[in-house]
Each structure stands twice: as C-alpha cells, then as structure tokens.
Image (spheres, rainbow, N blue to C red):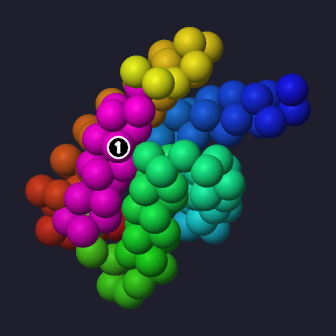
C-alpha cells in the first residue's frame, strides 16, 4: 500500500530530523513535513488524529510568527508528543516503535524549548 510506505518514510524522516536538532532544520522543511502530517491526519476521519492535525496547525502558526516564541513552540511540541503517546495503543504494530520514538523526541524537545527564553 503506497500510503503505508509514505507514512513509514515520513515517520522515519521526521524522527531523523528531530534527532539532528531543531536548529539544523530549515523552517521551510519543517513546514513541508508538518503539512504532510497534517494532511494525513485530517484525511483520516479519526477524531484523535484530527485533533493532532489541529495542533500541528497551531505549531505551524507559531513557527511562522516573528519573533519566534520558544516556550510556546515547546508547549505545542509537548502537546503533540502527548497526543501521539495517547494514540499509541491504537496504532498499527509496525508503527508503534516509530511513533513512540517520535512522541519521546517531541516531549523532550518541547520541554527544552519551554524552559528556553531565547527561542530559536
């Protein structure tokens, strides 16, 4: 199924980008990645995934505002990490490990940004 391969690739790419550090990720790439996730979640028809899509929209708004608000970005990433953690029990088995890694990264980075008053 092409969508599964695309989702698997998107998940792997997202994890890799977050592991490399947020400041090494160009905003344009972050926007493209979040847009891809948002579209998948919105089109899912699953309320929990659509909630994640709305938070991605919030994150995108924060990401394009000037000056960047590190603590607000951190809260949004933390919320995304928590939402992903909440859907883990219902995720396909072949996605659970990757989604768990993504959730952990988002929570960690979100926490770091929340305590950073310098933003990006």
Q: Residue furthest top?
A: 93
Where 80 falls versus 11 (above or below)? below
Q: Nearer the viewer, residue 72 or 37?
A: 37
Q: Identify the residue under disc 1.
A: 83
Q: Quadrant of the C terminus?
A: bottom left
Q: What's the residue at 27%, 49% (across, down)?
A: 78
Q: Position of residue 64 (x, y in %)?
A: 48, 79
The quarter of the displayed image where residue 1 is located: top right
Q: Is residue 95 above or below residue 27?
A: above
112 inside magenta stretch: no
- Where residue 116 appears, as percent x and y from the top left, is 16, 60
Q: Number of labelled discs? A: 1
In this view, the residue farthest toward the bottom is: 66
Residue 7 locus on image (x, y percent):
70, 35
Q: Residues within 10 Å of mark 1 (few under 14, many from 20)?
A: some
Q: Give the dominant element type of the magenta stretch: helix, strand or loop.
A: helix
Nearest the viewer among 44 and 98 is: 44
Residue at the image position 87 percent from the left and 32 percent from the top: 2
Furthest residue in direction right, as rendered: 2
Question: Could you tell me residue 107's position as x and y percent?
Answer: 27, 40
Residue occupying image coordinates x 12% and y 56%:
115
**Label 1 SS:** helix
Q: Is residue 9 visible?
A: no
Check the image and report above or below for 10 versus 115.
Answer: above
Q: Is residue 77 at least partly visible in the picture?
A: yes
Report the span colored magenta: 71-88
Q: Is residue 2 above or below residue 49?
A: above
The reply, left or right, for residue 58 in relation to residue 8 is left
């Amino acid at each position: 199924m092409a969508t599964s391969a695309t989702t698997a690739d998107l998940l792997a790419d997202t994890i890799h980008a977050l592991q490399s550090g947020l400041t090494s990720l160009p905003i344009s790439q972050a926007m493209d990645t979040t847009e891809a996730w948002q579209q998948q979640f919105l089109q899912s028809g699953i309320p929990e995934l659509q909630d994640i899509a709305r938070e991605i929209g919030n994150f995108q708004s924060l990401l394009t505002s000037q000056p960047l608000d590190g603590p607000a970005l951190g809260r949004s990433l933390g919320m995304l990490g928590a939402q992903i953690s909440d859907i883990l029990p219902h995720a396909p088995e072949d996605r659970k490990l990757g989604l768990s890694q993504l959730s952990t990264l988002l929570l960690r980075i979100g926490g770091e940004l929340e305590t950073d008053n310098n933003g990006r």
